[in-house]
Image (tube, rainbow, N blue to C red):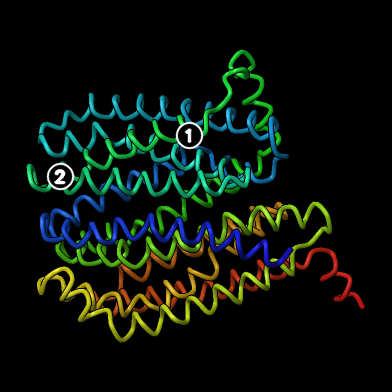
Amino acid sequence: MQNSYWKTVLSVFTGSAIAQVIPVLGALLIARQFGPGQFGLFSAWLGIVIILSTALTGRLEVSLALERDGRFRNAATFAVLATTLLIAVLALSVLVLLYLFTSYNYFDTLMLLVVLVPCATLFSLNQVWQSWAAAEGRFRQLNMMRVVQSVFVVALQISAGFLWPNATALALSYALGLLLAQIYCMWLLPVSLRWFRRCGPLTLAYARRHRKFLAFSLPADFINALAIQLPVMIVAHRFGAESAGYLALVIRVLGLPLSFLGKAVLDVFKRQASMAFRERGECRDEYVRTFWVLGAGSALFAVGAYFLSEPVFAIAFGEEWRPAGAISVLLVPMFTLRFIASPLSYVIYIFNKQQVDLVWQTCLLAMTYGVLSYVNTEMAAIFIYSVSYASLYVVYLAISYRYSCGESHKQRARL
């Protein structure tokens, strides 16, 4: 059983690694094509896209792993897709009304505004399909979805850089890449349309059954997305678009590979942990063995990033990007703990404790805004932010481990 577990983890891990090597290698050329200023503007726009995409699904895609395999999960997926499209239509209507009342005329700003909701919708749909594949244990298809998405987005952004090297071109090519990736997902793993006639009742019933995700996980993950994207926005406002570009590149080069590799572990862990919870009422063994592997990986990352980041950034992206290497060293504590804590945090959902996550995410948002807004110098603000973030992750790990023990933890405490 244990060998099968880690064989599956390795398979998903390998696929995610390939999917992330592509954008990291692509960033080598993209950074030279667009420069820190345009890259920073695009990253601020992308932050808004990711924040909005969090709201579009109602975070109900996270609940797919809790459903039984087969037609039960197929119906659940249809309900989540219907919810996503409905909220997307409402969001687009609100944006159109805002535009009519404010009348933006600047072309680049208008184009970024036009593509905002469609891009967020496509991002959400891609996430739903990937969550569905992971919940079903279809890890080969999951790997293919991620690799294809990376190829489409990076290839189109590099092509745009030769023709129209600005933030708008990056945004439009990103949206087109997501569209092509979504078409591929629908072909690879088609959802049954037999639920269409019961769309309304099915969607309402599913939302009611998983109302804790709407009541607690949605605001918690919305806050988390805001907290993750807020640093680039605040740095852009306080220290300029160039500084935001440095920070955005660090997050892309270091953050995305770690998050996707961690997500590869999560895709397996949440299925195995959910099954263990249904069978035993706890998932401590799955939690502990996953913790040690993630811990070993994060230690290797921390050592390499601390000693190699600055020269590697300068050599790989050009001397003008050397400050990004210095920033990456400051963010090592945050990335190291994130790699461990993020996958294991799914225990909170398994044990239906979403309200705990909401409290933690609120503390994270308050810390992020307070530190980055009021610490005087850029480097000091980023370092204090990184250490504070890592400390909050330590608290999160302690909470998630306690829940992984299930009722046995409470019984031992009473003894």
Which residue is found at the position 23% from the left and 76% from the top? Answer: 325
Which residue is found at the position 15% from the left and 32% from the top? Answer: 104
Find disc 2 in the rendering and name its residue: 159
Element carrying mark 1: helix
Q: Is residue 175 left or right of residue 78?
A: left
Which residue is found at the position 27% from the left and 35% from the top? Answer: 176
Q: Residues within 10 Å of mark 2 (few under 14, many from 20)?
A: some
Q: Position of residue 139 (x, y in %)?
A: 55, 49
**Above or below — where is 152 with respect to 17?**
above
Find disc 1 in the rendering and name its residue: 188
- Indicate the amino acid at tag 2: Ser
Please tell me which residue lies in front, 226 or 320.
320
Quadrant where the image shows the C terminus:
bottom right
Q: Does the rendering let one see residue 337?
A: yes
Q: Position of residue 402 (x, y in %)?
A: 72, 70
Quadrant where the image shows the N terminus:
bottom right
Residue 71, numbered label: none
